[in-house]
Image (spheres, grey):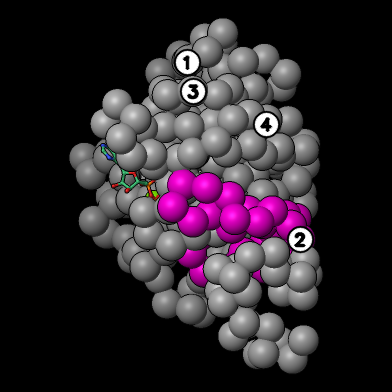
Amino acid sequence: MIVLRGLSKSHDGGRTFAVRELSLEVPDGKTLVLLGSSGSGKTTVLKMINRLVEPTSGTVSVDGVDVLEQDPVRLRRSIGYVFQQVGLFPHMSIEENITVGLRLAGRPPEERRLRARELLGLVELPADLYAGRYPSELSGGQAQRVGVARALAAEPKYLLMDEPFGALDELTRESLRAALKSLRARLEKTVVFVTHDIFEALDLGDSIAVMHEGRVEQLGSGEDLLKRPATAFVERLFRKPAELLEL
Ligand SMILES: Nc1ncnc2c1ncn2[C@@H]1O[C@H](COP(=O)(O)OP(=O)(O)OP(=O)(O)O)[C@@H](O)[C@H]1O
Ligand SMILES: [Mg+2]
């Protein structure tokens, strides 16, 4: 499980805060969605979980151990990260992109090749067609799928996903969401999923933390947020969706 306690991050010595006094828990096997507008601190939270950003104060623990006491390489191997900008290496084939972490960990070529094929199948890209291609030969949605496959390569227990389906059309988002749901059901991952899309949050989140200016405005189930908004901000945010869902 992932536990965040009183987590804050300031980039300017405490004048302003990207994340402020944030406390959240993600139980094993569950998906927590961080929902918030641009600049609300979502990416900063994800990066503090796997130590890409050091907190100004507060703690993060993964599997009951403070991440600052864990070996960063081991920690990152146990946490798959899908970046906001997919970030595939342009000079590497899709297979090499997916298995770059396994190569760094010294896994043999044949194992990497098989694992890449398996992962491509999981994200519904036929390996025969895609394993040997280069990132410039993929559509945006296909590149996002490869980003998800890469995050799964080391069989991490945890997945951090930063707007993994951002900048895609609604139909592609829907199909990627369905793929993620079936994958999550089969692999029992613990997921922190960042989005600014309310319907995506409602569809994927066991719980949803609504973030605003670095703070959690409200933490709850989709139903809580739709029917029992705790602040004026959450009420405004969920009013339209509640109408559309006829609540
Ligand atoms: N390295 C940095 N130096 C200074 N300020 C930063 C840095 N990284 C982030 N910030 C600021 O921290 C705040 C939160 O940024 P963050 O990237 O976490 O937002 P976000 O919720 O992920 O937004 P988006 O939806 O646009 O990706 C923003 O005001 C941003 O400008
Ligand atoms: Mg972000």
Could you tell me which secondary element the residue under label 4 belongs to? strand
Numbered circle sitting on residue 2? 4
Residue toward you, 173 or 45: 45
Closer to us: mark 1 or mark 2? 2
Dot 3 or dot 1: first in sequence order is 3
Image position, residue 185 (x, y; %): 77, 52
Name the one closer to the observer, 234 or 175.
234
**Quarter of the figure with the N terminus:** top right
Identity, as a three-letter code, of the amino acid under mark 4: Ile
- Residue at the image point whose x is 62% and y is 82% from the top: 239
Q: Quadrant of residue 18?
A: top left
Q: Closer to us: mark 1 or mark 4? A: 4
- The residue range painted magenta reads 195-222
Dot 2: element: loop
Which residue appears at 42% of the width and 77% of the height? Answer: 169
Q: Secondary structure at mark 3?
A: strand
The disc, 1 or 4, on the residue closer to the chain's N-terminal end is 4
User: Does label 4 or label 2 sit earlier along the sequence?
Assistant: 4
Residue carrying label 1: 73
For label 3, the residue is: 57
Q: Position of residue 64 (x, y in %)?
A: 72, 18
3 vs 4, front mark: 3
